[in-house]
Image: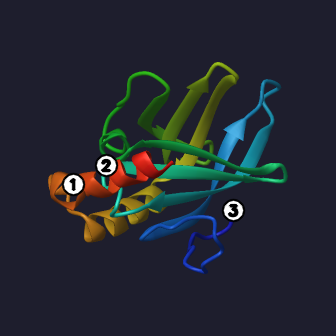
């Protein structure tokens, strides 16, 4: 598994204040383990959300969910609906974070190294402190973007 690196190369993949390239693990229906390259990203302009981008040969697939859900899920199971996050232990005994994604197209359970997720969360907290999201959120910008679409 590769070590995480900051994705600040301007690749166009994200306009984030924080982006971290990580590899997550999943098991397919046959029990075969796969590694998937992903990018966790966070933008202070959208302070309530994090994005998980799956880099595939068919293009990038982005899941967006609450930063607070990710933060809570590192300590105890959290989530309702399409995204659930919980602490887990990997097959090697390493501390992991389980990120479970559901959609009408399928269900996927991913395992990310806890140290990677903790590093990412710490970087987001340096951009916008928990509890200060409302102060950082620019509602006027969002409205203007919606009206110009």
| In the image: residue 97, left or right of residue 111 | left
Instruction: Classify the position of the N terminus by image quarter.
Output: bottom right
Q: Earlier in the sequence, mark 1 or mark 3?
A: 3
Task: Indicate which label's residue lies in the foreground, 2 or 3.
Answer: 2
Is disc 3 placed on a helix, strand or loop? loop
**Mark 2 near mark 1, Cβ–Cβ under 8 Å?**
yes
> Which labelled disc corresponds to residue 47?
none
Q: Give the residue drawn at x 42%, y 71%.
A: 17
x then y, percent, for residue 82: 50, 26
x then y, percent, for residue 34: 77, 44
Judging depth in this view, the residue of 5 and 132 nearest the camera is 132
x then y, percent, for residue 147: 41, 46
Q: Which residue is mark 3?
A: 1
Q: Which residue is mark 1?
A: 133
**Relative to 149, residue 121 above or below:** below
Q: Is residue 14 visible?
A: yes
Q: Earlier in the sequence, mark 2 or mark 1?
A: 2
| In the image: residue 22, left or right of residue 119 | right
Q: Which residue is mark 2?
A: 48
């Amino acid at each position: 598994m590769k070590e995480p690196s900051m994705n600040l190369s301007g690749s166009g993949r994200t306009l984030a204040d924080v982006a971290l390239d990580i590899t997550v693990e999943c098991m397919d229906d046959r029990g075969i383990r796969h590694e998937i390259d992903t990018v966790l990203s966070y933008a202070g302009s959208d302070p309530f959300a994090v994005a998980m981008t799956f880099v595939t040969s068919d293009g990038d697939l982005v899941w967006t969910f609450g930063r607070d859900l990710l933060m809570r899920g590192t300590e105890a199971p959290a989530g309702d609906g399409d995204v659930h996050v919980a602490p887990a232990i990997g097959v090697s005994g390493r501390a992991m974070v389980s990120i479970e994604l559901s959609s009408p197209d399928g269900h996927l359970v991913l395992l990310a190294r806890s140290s990677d997720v903790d590093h990412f969360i710490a970087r987001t907290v340096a951009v916008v402190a928990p509890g200060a999201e409302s102060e950082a959120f620019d509602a006027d910008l969002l409205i203007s973007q919606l009206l110009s679409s």
